[in-house]
Amino acid sequence: MSRFTIIVAATKANGIGVNARLPWRLPKEMKYFAQVTSAAPEGRQNVVIMGRNTWESIPQKFRPLPKRLNVVISRNTSLDLGTSDKSVLLKGNLNSALSVLSEGQSTSLNRGFIIGGATLYTESLALPLSPTEHGVDRVLLTRILSPDFEECDVFMPDFLKQGDWTRSTHSELQEWVGFEVPEAFVGESQLTQYVQTNLGYRQPFFLFYLVHSSFSMIFPLHLLYLLATTEYTTTSLMKGLSITIAHHLAPNQFSNAYRYQFPRTKFLRLVLYCTVGITCPGLLWFAAVSLASVTDVTAIWNTNAFFAYIISVKLLKLQWEFRRLLAVVLATLGTVAVVYGGSTASPDTQQGSSATVNASLKPTAPLVGNLLTLIASFGYGLYQVLYKIYAALPSDPEARAERAYEEIPDEVVEDENNISRDRTSFDVNPSEAVYPPPFGLYPNLVTSLLGLCTCILLWIPIPFLHWSGVEIFRLPSNLLTAASICGIALGGMIFNAGFMVLLGVWGPIIVSVGNLLTIVLVLISDIIFGAGFEVLTTWSLLGSGVIVLAFGVLAYDMFTKSL
């Protein structure tokens, strides 16, 4: 059955009208209403349902509301609506109006909105929400803060006291509506969000597939750069990588740089494991977002820094260090402060004449969603540690500095003693093999192969998602959407190329905490490109400062050990 959204502007006393008209004129609110109710993917349109009085209160020159299917409810089924426009339908009751969207879901209709008046709000809120009935599962409320408009004679039901509703965060509101909301504390600036909302291209799994598949371009681009800026040849670079991989994965079978057998099976297994390790947490995150609140999912996901430290201590047999543990805990708490602190302020404390908030039914399965996120966070932390142990090359600053890596007993791990082993010196002709390979070339090779595996394997679920209706497949409908997706892929390539290189150089603890710095960068980008300094709260400043401090402590700890 169809789910509908109520959109309404009301005073603090829930007043919504006086003498059959709006008692205020707020251009930003009117623009917001138009954007929310008309935004739809290309080729589709939203439905706005209203009572007769609401229809007649709209100035005639603006009727019908453009780019939307207007459904008017009146007991007088022969009512003259004053227009023959095909985008206007007359229905005799709420149920027949609500059925319009379900009848048109397979054709051209997108979302449904109930826009007034009070009787329609009351009737729709009284509908039970069940799998077999139409109902309302979201209310977009713009709270008029000042003046009080005491003359209001029509009121919105106090729905927060009548049902199992919860207030969502501003970030969740913006994610749903797809653009920056006036007076909001948090502004989404990620290009992915722009594509899925503003451009109406809601294909999360397909975007995930495209972005991860694009990683396959990292190594070829790095190789082209080296060929253009150095005297290396493709053959010598690939030969050097072959020697490096053979010595790393099969040191006991490696005699010299000219007589060795490349460990194809071990290397293929390594690439497949890495693909699973980096893909599964991401897919669990997508599943969790549909079950729990975005705020909870974000906060729990970013505990992977804490898990990375715990797992590192256990698997690498490190000693507990108070300074590192404190830094990781502080970074995690800083993340919680930023994530939750930006959503706890009451709209009544905001400046201006109105504040837009988002109320929706509580997440369908918050416990399951939070548990999935916890598993994903643990899995991501585990992946970082296992990559450091099995995939990363041993000769990096952290491996040389962290003497505790050398204490891994042979009976616990077979090959991990290579983590701290200095690279053996081979008599290699530079014209035949570039050994050791240039900085970053090996991790970029691994990352590219992860992308190739994703491209080969992860297309398989796409037809099933399409046939089941979970994610109807469609290609980008215009060049802007395609270009934006390319931008997402480029950003993903740059981030993951740097991430995999640093994971081998710095190790999972520092890199996982360093990842949290992206929260600070997003906050800065919101200030520059979003709502300005309005996004700042005491908690966001405090949390960001703590994250930066924690990363500084870990970086200082690493570099002092390397001296």
Image (cartoon, rainbow, N blue to C red):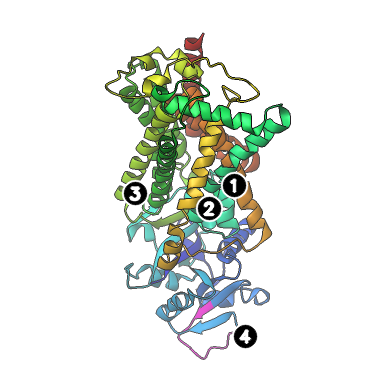
Dot 1 and dot 3 residues touching (CB under 8 Å)? no
Q: Is residue 20 left or right of residue 295?
A: right
- Crowding around mark 2 (Cα neighbors within 10 Å: few <14, some 14 to 19, many 20+) is some
- Residue at the (51%, 50%) spot, across then down: 455
Q: Which mark is residue 216?
A: none
Q: Residue at x 62, y 71 (%)?
A: 67
* 70 displayed left or right of 103: right
Circle 4 or circle 2, nearest the eye: 2
Q: Which label belongs to residue 488?
A: 1
Q: Amino acid at mark 1?
A: Ile
| Mark 1 in CB contact with mark 2 (< 8 angstroms) | yes
Q: Residue furthest bottom?
A: 78
Q: Secondary structure at mark 3?
A: helix
Residue under numbered circle 4: 82
Place of residue 467 in the rendered image (x, y in percent of width and height, measured from the top left): 43, 67
Q: Are marks 4 and 1 in contact (CB under 8 Å)?
A: no
Residue placed under numbered mark 2 in the picture? 207
Frontmost of labels 3 and 4 is 3
Q: Earlier in the sequence, mark 4 or mark 1?
A: 4
Mark 4 falls on what kind of element?
loop
Residue extending farthest front: 259
Residue receiving disc 3: 369
Q: Give the foreground label among 2 and 3.
A: 2
Query: Residue shown at 57%/70% (left/top)?
Result: 44
Of the residues under marks 3 and 4, which one precedes in the sequence? 4
Which of marks 3 and 2 precedes in the sequence? 2
Give coordinates of residue 556: x percent, y percent. 50, 15
What amino acid is at disc 3?
Gly
